[in-house]
Image: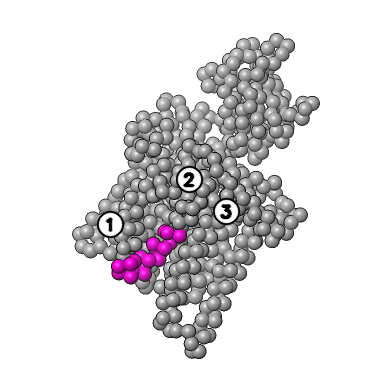
Amino acid sequence: MKMEIRRKDVILVCLFTIGFFCIALWGLGSHSIPQTEQELSARGDGAKEVVLYFEEGQQLSDLLLFIGYRAAGEVTVSVAAGADWQIVQSGEELDSVFAWNEIPVSYRTTCLGLVFSDASVNLMELVCLDENGEPVLPVNAMQYPALFDEQELYEDGITYQDQTIFDEIYHGRTAYEFLHGLPIYENTHPPLGKTLISVGIAVFGMNPFGWRFMCVVFGSLMMPFIYLFGLRLTGKTRYACLAAVLLGTDFMHFTLSRIATIDIIVAFFILGMFYFMYAFVVSEKRRYLLLAGLFTGLGCATKWTGIYALCGLFVVFLLWMIGKIRKIGVKKETRRYWTWLCLQCIGCFILLPFTIYTLSYIPFVRIYPDQNLLQHVLSNGELMLSYHKATIFDHPYASPWYSWLFDWKPLLDSREYLAGDKVSVIATFGNPVLYFAGLYAYGKELWRTFRNKDKNAAVLVLYYTVMLLPWIFIRRTVFIYQYYVCSVVLILLLCHSVSQKEGGQEKRAYWGLLAASVLLFVVFYPVISGLVVPAVYIRQVIPWLPNWRFL
């Protein structure tokens, strides 16, 4: 359908984009975390240790250790018992980087020792809590100045605003490593997403706001794309607005835009791939092929799910080409047309993506110069293949692909219990209005594809199917966020489905979807944003489905 962008469309796009950006940015995270690292002395066996002395009979309840970019492995906590040491905690894992790691102690002592199994431990701050949960300084704090110089950064009730959560311990950490030329920890996805996250860290520093900022940017930039897609799909501003509102009020879109992981970034590129290929098949303007190829390279260099999307582009292009051949044929008069089209496709969808993908490994060459770009591409590709084949483990929030369709099992990213029976929770799951209405729309559009030969419906059905189909055959441990791109396509399916209705039925569907989506976004905002609320709200208002229990 022909698309006309008017002044009001430009204004609306700006309002939706800036509005979402401001809402997502509010409460994103702290600008300050511990910065100074304490050099620890080594014992004879090479392990690092800290020995703290307290006033006579100091009751300790917990220790909170802020770990930098190198995890500390295991720590053993002991207290002095006469001339000997008595172990009170053994084998405690300190594996959350750029985060506060809690160790329960519950012991009265004058001397406490910590022994770290990993000699390269990156210990930034240590807070000792008494029986009332109040920080207490050891009498020899000056012996470890960097461990006790930023005590004010600990607040009673650490939340997502003060530390990494979920996969930020991988993607945020590796973005920091790229920026500083440190050994790379996370190498199970291509590098571009982490490189883009590092831009926020370079500007705002290595803190929760800094490592999450670029994800807010990409989540916000999806608003213009979804608006333009809705406008081109239906030719009407009202449905473009519907698409933007449904995206902006989708729970998963909001959550992923505020967490430093690569999923929102690859979704942005895939949405661009889908939009530009659709724009090409309806307008036949070659510049859209170039843009689709550009976004293909960027998407695949962020996460391999971009390859699933590329398969969708191929099928859509193939169907368009079959229709074009029927229309103009393959003959002498059209030979030049088909030759140039084939050459352009080779350049746009093979050479350009390959170049972008290869160049994304520049951080690898900078850190590991023993291999060139192509060698890193091949060796890391082998590693990623073996990793994703073998990544099978038990996880309380893992969920099979078919459960995603019904929003059955959310992923808990963060949960912190606070004083006064309050909590901060962040969960990844979808707005049920979008998921259930979208699934119905998929069925309607599938029917319209075969019965009415509706090409717009066919493209959307293909996009959704190619993003879901691979997960049916993947046997690795998977989570609901891997359905995110499918849920974005559901928005477009809904918009197109509503646009086919007439009269009062169309108005009821349109305004009903808008109102319900916004209302549920407000109701569920505390569990997708980390907003501190009374625990009773999470226990009694939120659990609409059996698995929607976060406490």
Considering the numbered disc 3 on the image, is that residue within a helix, a strand or a loop? helix
In the image, the segment drawn in magenta is 449-466
The vertical placement of 445 against 212, above or below, is below
Q: Earlier in the sequence, mark 2 or mark 1?
A: 2
Residue 121 picture location, percent across and down: 69, 34
Q: Farthest residue in the left direction?
A: 504
Residue 442 picture location, percent across and down: 35, 58
- Mark 2 or mark 1: which is in front? 2
Q: Earlier in the sequence, mark 2 or mark 3?
A: 3
Q: State the residue at coordinates (62%, 32%).
A: 94
**Image quarter of the C terminus:** top left
- Say which residue label 3 marks: 193
**Image quarter of the N terminus:** bottom left
**Any part of residue 380 in sight:** yes
Q: State the residue at coordinates (36%, 30%).
A: 536
Foreground of the two, 171 or 480: 480
Foreground of the two, 273 or 238: 273
Amino acid, disc 1: Tyr
- Say which residue label 2 marks: 479
- Spatial CA distance of label 2 from label 1 is 31 Å
Indicate whether residue 457 is drawn in magenta: yes
Amino acid, disc 2: Phe
- Spatial CA distance of label 3 from label 1 is 36 Å
- Say which residue label 1 marks: 510
Residue 281 picture location, percent across and down: 43, 72
- Spatial CA distance of label 2 from label 3 is 19 Å
Amino acid, disc 3: Gly
**Any part of residue 242 in sight:** no
Indicate whether residue 118 is drawn in magenta: no
Q: Quadrant of residue 227?
A: bottom left
Q: State the residue at coordinates (55%, 66%).
A: 294
Considering the numbered disc 1 on the image, is that residue within a helix, a strand or a loop? helix
